[in-house]
Image (tube, grey):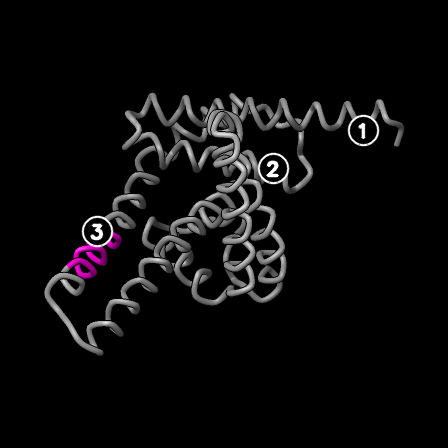
Amino acid sequence: MKLIDKFSVISDWIIRLVWTNLVWLFLVLIGGIALGFMPATVALFTITRKWARGDLDAPVWKSAWQTYKQVFVSANLAGGIFAAIGIFLYADLRIVFELMHGFWSTILYFFLMFLLFLVAIAFLQYFTVFVHFKMKNVRAYVAQAFLLAITSFKNTFMIVVGLVFCAWLISKMPAFILFISGVLPSYWIMKINLHRFKQMEPSNPLQYW
């Protein structure tokens, strides 16, 4: 590949990433942040899934807006489930930290920390599950996300490494929040999980988009 061709590819990717991230942020904002985050992020993963499968010319705004409207209710229901679980575990964690002492309280504290970490990973997995599989209801998507979080240790490790790198990059250049804060982690997570999904397909009865 000639130097000018490499420059063109890099430029296309920069424009693609920045535009998609700005669309994601816009969709989050028009939903009032609290109600906009879940459907906007599902829309974001829908686009990055297409990229990871080789469809780099998918129309970003059209795909994102259509998905956003379609999944607004179901995505927020799933978000409510994850939020309820997270709040419950966090409340337990605070109780253990403030009211309990001794060896077993320390064990319980770290166990609850592990559960919170598991919920966070399942939350991330939910988006890839939602855009890749066809399931009958919100509960099925959430359950599959937890199943992936529990069984895919290698994927979890790689996801965490990628997220740490993204966080480090943004900490060094805070302006990147506008340009890659959502799209880069999304693409990384989707790319990793697509490999896992391909391994699952021959023996998994789930339907795929």
Check whether the beta carbons of the residues at disc 3 and disc 2 lie within 8 A of each other.
Answer: no
In the picture provided, is 104 more to the left or to the right than 47? Answer: left
Give the main secondary structure of the magenta stretch. helix
Task: Using the numbered discs, state the Cα–Cα distance from disc 2 to disc 1 in whole angstroms.
Answer: 22 Å
Range of residues picked out in magenta? 85-94
Name the quadrant containing residue 195. Answer: bottom right
- Hey, what amino acid is under mark 2? Lys
Quadrant containing the N terminus in the rendered view: top right
Q: Which mark's residue is nearer the viewer, 2 or 1?
A: 1
What residue is shown at x 66% (from left), y 27% (from top)? 57
Where residue 88 sits: x, y (%)?
19, 56
In the picture provided, is 77 more to the left or to the right than 10? Answer: left
> Which of pointers 3 and 1 lies earlier in the amino acid sequence?
1
Q: Check residue 89 for magenta coloring.
A: yes
Residue bearing the label numbered 2: 50
- Hey, what amino acid is under mark 1? Lys
Residue bearing the label numbered 3: 87
Quadrant containing the C terminus in the rendered view: top right
- Circle 3 — which element? helix
Residue bearing the label numbered 1: 6
